[in-house]
Amino acid sequence: MAPAPLSSLDVAFLCLSRETAPMQMGVALVFAPDEPICPDRLTALLARRAANIPPLRRKIRAGLFPPGSATWVDDLDFQAVKHIHQHRLTTLYDPDPLPEFAARWIAEPLDPHRPLWELTVVTGFPDGAFAILLKLHHALTDGAGAYAVTVGLLDGLPLPEPAPAIPQPRTPLDAMRDTLETAGIASSVVRAARPPCLPLAAPATAGRRLGFARLASADLRRIRRTHGGTTNDVVLGVLSGALREWLVNRGIRATGRSVRALIPVNVRGRAAGHVGGNKLSGYLCDLPIGMDDPVRRLAEVREAMARNKAAGPSRGAGAFPLLADRMPAALHWLGTRTAGLAAPLLFDLVVTTVPVPPARHALAGAPLTEVYPFVPLAPHQAVGIAVAPYRDSVHIGLQANADAVEDLGSLRDAVAKSAAELLDAS
């Protein structure tokens, strides 16, 4: 394939990466085969399919002009099998071995000189299940693109064909509109800065903790029918209650406080579609952890998200990814790391939803039963949350700074408790 330039937003994710804050997303896919499957067979199958996914065959080459630019080029030495590893769990020491192993796995930075992905086949589950851990650098794609890549690894699901990029003519009026929109976003970012929520701001560290939470879709639908809103609103309401419970249990006073979440928004429909690259904007939503009443918390979240949607993804401080995409790449190399240190002044954590269509998925004939995504931690932030609705459950992947959060299990338990409170009120 012909070389393809990285967008300015892709370059920004490259610049943000460091050993203590690798900008890489991940997912744990759990499968339930009828009988044990040989890990070597899985490795060979995944290698064949990965070799047919163009973004996985490409690496980054720095450009000379414009300054700071970079390009995706084919890796002439590419061998998919070199990106795929195997691990067998042991239950002798770890009470929950998959999250324990996956936390060490996701903390290891990808090699920037190779294609920016890695797979691990995990076996050794007592019930014969197996898991696939997939790690992708955020420069390669966003959550929607990551799902499209994953589709190419599963049975009977070919990689979606990219939509052809059709250049649209630009007029002076379009340029003026973009300039005004960019200025508005920049002004909103400055006005939105505020002191961070200190329990969720922490010195950067390489260690990670992961937690898996699972909610019944039927319970969330019941809450929606009673209190209104979208499934995403209900999940944010549940997470608001969980964060409140978790912080109070850590001795933090929650009354009158809020936690600001960055909610990434997929804007692929507004631009030429393709599997790779980032097409993102975002909303900022203050989660009302200071409210004791779960129904009032949900109502507050619904109203905040309704205001965000009415304004649209091109306005407000949460749209700063659009601002980053309009900056020259050279500025990211000069200032993105410094700007990353200021992330806690704008938002306390990321809460993202990964689209997973409800069709039944499988690998080597084994049905997919669980999907736990993980969002990278922004520099100096302690917790990140990713959500994936699939079949009869909503799966929640929790990632935390290991030095700042020793009790991620209590946050996982608080998610279930918060959902139960809303269900009782429905």
Image: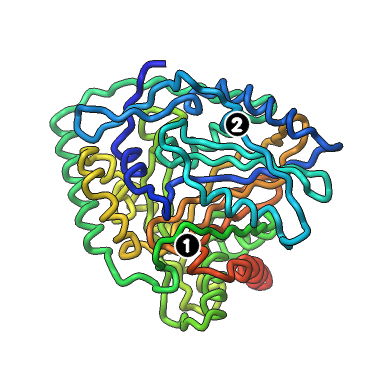
* Residue 349 can be seen in this image: yes
Quarter of the image with the N terminus in it: top left
The spot of residue 48 in percent (x, y) is: 63, 22
The spot of residue 60 in percent (x, y) is: 37, 30
Classed neighbour count for the residue bearing mark 1: other residues with Cα under 10 Å, few (<14), some (14–19), many (≥20) = many
Residue 186 as seen in the image, left or right of residue 278 = left
Task: Name the kind of residue labelled 2 in the image.
Answer: Val
Q: Residue at x 29, y 52 (%)?
A: 337
The spot of residue 43 in percent (x, y) is: 68, 30
Task: Name the kind of residue labelled 1 in the image.
Answer: Arg
Quarter of the image with the C terminus in it: bottom right
Q: Residue at x 21, y 46 (%)?
A: 334
The dot on residue 151 is 2
Residue 194 as seen in the image, left or right of residue 110 = left
Residue 383 as seen in the image, left or right of residue 210 = left
User: Which residue has dot 1 on it?
Assistant: 302
As displayed, is residue 88 above or below residue 424?
above
Snapshot quadrant of residue 366 = top right
Q: In whole angstroms, how far apart are the C-alphas of marks 1 and 2? A: 32 Å
In primary-sequence order, the first of circles 1 and 2 is 2
- As helix, strand or loop, the secondary structure at mark 1 comes to helix
